[in-house]
Amino acid sequence: MKKLSKKTLKKSFVTWFYGNLTCFSQEHMQTFGYLCAMLPIVEELYEKEEDKKKAMDTYTAFFNTEPQIGTLVVGMTAGLEEAKANGQPIDGEAINGIRAGLMGPLAGIGDSMIVGTLIPILLGIGLGLSGGGNPLGAIFYIIAWNFLMWFGMKFAYFKGYELGGKAVEILVGEQAQAIRDSIIMIGTIVIGAVAASWINIHTSLVLPGGGELQKTLDGIYPKFLSGGAVVFCWWLMSKKNISPTMVMLLLVVIAFVGVLIGFFDPGLSY
Amino acid sequence: MEINIFQAVLLGICACLSSMPGLGGTTFGNYTLGRPLVAGLIVGLILGDVKTGIIIGAAIQVIYIALVTPGGTVSADVRAISYIGIPLAICAVKGMGLDPDTAQAQSMAAALGAAVGTLGTVLFYGTATMNLIWQHIGWKAVENGDFKKLYLVDMGLPWISHFVCSFLPTVLITLAGAGMVDIMKAYLPMDGIAMKTLFTVGSLLPAVGVAILLKQVVKKTVDFITFFFGFTLAASLGLNLIAAAIIGSFFAVINYKIIMLQNKKAAAGGPTDDDDDEEDI
């Protein structure tokens, strides 16, 4: 009965943690990171060169997902490879089937939860601590983010290794979905606060009769123009399917026209 | 303000570590060193002005608060935003004699950072394409059973791609940056249309960053209420971001409890054949 040592598993995890995307290309995104992470596992489980080669061949298949949450898959395959080496009825094809099946769903969860929610929440708090050039915000982000990811990814790797296929339940079960839904709620509220604190769109237009348009709008709803601009950009991207880069270019045109007609005027001189 | 060769080299190394397929690794490279907020601190330390660095990094961060790269396509390159854009923005703000802690200086930084970031996508595709050469060496190694070489392919050889596509561009552009500010000052007066447009664009850009994020979370129009709840907390009630996060967490806990209650009800109402006692945690 072959059993992977803790040291080998740790080495595999650290290799993935650092090297998942270091040799990225459009053709084979995380494939080489995966190969490197599996190498310590394969070397410990198999004696003969040809067995090693056969095992490594499994992992030459294309792999790409959100790499941080994808740690779970690497841990799972370490467990499956161990089972395979012990003669259980699993072959390379089955392992690759599991890998391919999880790539897409995990990328979706990782992109929305980690990159789209956790990072903005941490950055939002960091921005809040950065007022007046205070380095505390950046330091908070560096520590909080790396702490959460190192231990979170380690947990995912070893859970994947222990539970195998059952590990996916942690991420897609009913309770997981409720937690996800709630965390996204925090993220959306924080982003609302970030928008209100950091977007400052001002108009210099003076209404006929002498009133300032900016004051009138803020009287209706504070930061009306800033909130409106967010909804407008969202509408362009979600409903009109315009790419972010095109939206930015469109804003250049809007700014230019706005300056010409006197709607915008930063009012500066050297 | 001048950037000397020693400072430029340090910025170049940071660029190698922090980009999307960066050599600092995904978590510590791309998602830590690459974030403009963190880069603001690091560039500030390198250039000897932490306060300005942080203010400018934070202003640019808002645009890129949700830089998701689904399937490896990028709309902006973090190494360019953070280690070319931020140093240039610091030079520009100081060269023009603006107080960094003003909306104008931050607009200027945002516009510069976004322009550099968009152009910087060339560097991303350059690095990824060059890595194909190393991957080719890697496939040969796998074929020959020379597996130890995989570590070199994954973590060593990409340094060459980064020397060409991250280090050199960063060093050259930041060294030339200070001169660029003088040219801008000479040919583009602050009260001219071009500069007014630049500053205005900078004030509009953070709206795009927030909208990119909302595109992911707002599925139904009702979800906007959650967003504007947070917006109102800060804009009308004047709460800071930490206070908003705590209020958000409170509602999230309630939300979680409601969903779990619903789940339980559904489980109890239907034919209860599965193990629902596992769920009362």
Image (tube, coloured by chain):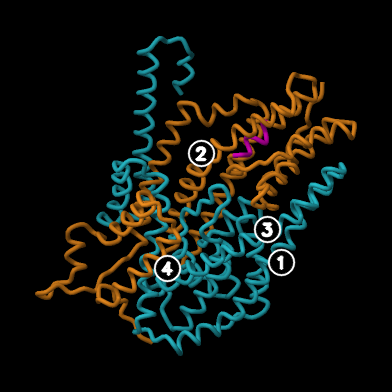
Chain colours: A orange, B cyan
Above or below B272: residue B281: below
- The verdict on a common chain for dots 2 and 1 is no
- Secondary structure under badge 3? helix
Residue B155 placement (x, y as % from top left): 74, 53
Using the numbered discs, state the Cα–Cα distance from disc 3 to disc 2 in whole angstroms. 28 Å
Q: Please tell me whether mark 3 or mark 1 is closer to you in this view.
A: 3
Magenta residues? Answer: A70-76
Q: Are marks 3 and 2 in contact (CB under 8 Å)?
A: no
- The verdict on a common chain for dots 4 and 3 is no
Above or below B8: residue A60: above
Residue A105 placement (x, y as % from top left): 54, 35
Using the numbered discs, state the Cα–Cα distance from disc 2 to disc 1 in whole angstroms. 34 Å
Residue at the (83%, 48%) spot, across then down: B140
Find disc 1 in the rendering and name its residue: B163
- Secondary structure under badge 4? helix
* Magenta span contains residue B264: no
The picture quadrant where one finds residue A180 is: top left
Find disc 2 in the rendering and name its residue: A109
Q: Please tell me whether mark 1 or mark 4 is closer to you in this view.
A: 1
Find disc 4 in the rendering and name its residue: A132
Give A108 or A14, whichever is nearer the viewer: A108
Using the numbered discs, state the Cα–Cα distance from disc 4 to disc 3 in whole angstroms. 41 Å
Chain of residue at mark 3? B
The picture quadrant where one finds residue A106 is: top right
Q: Residue furthest right?
A: A48
Using the numbered discs, state the Cα–Cα distance from disc 3 to disc 1 in whole angstroms. 14 Å
Find disc 3 in the rendering and name its residue: B129
Above or below B125: residue A213: below
Residue A148 placement (x, y as % from top left): 56, 44
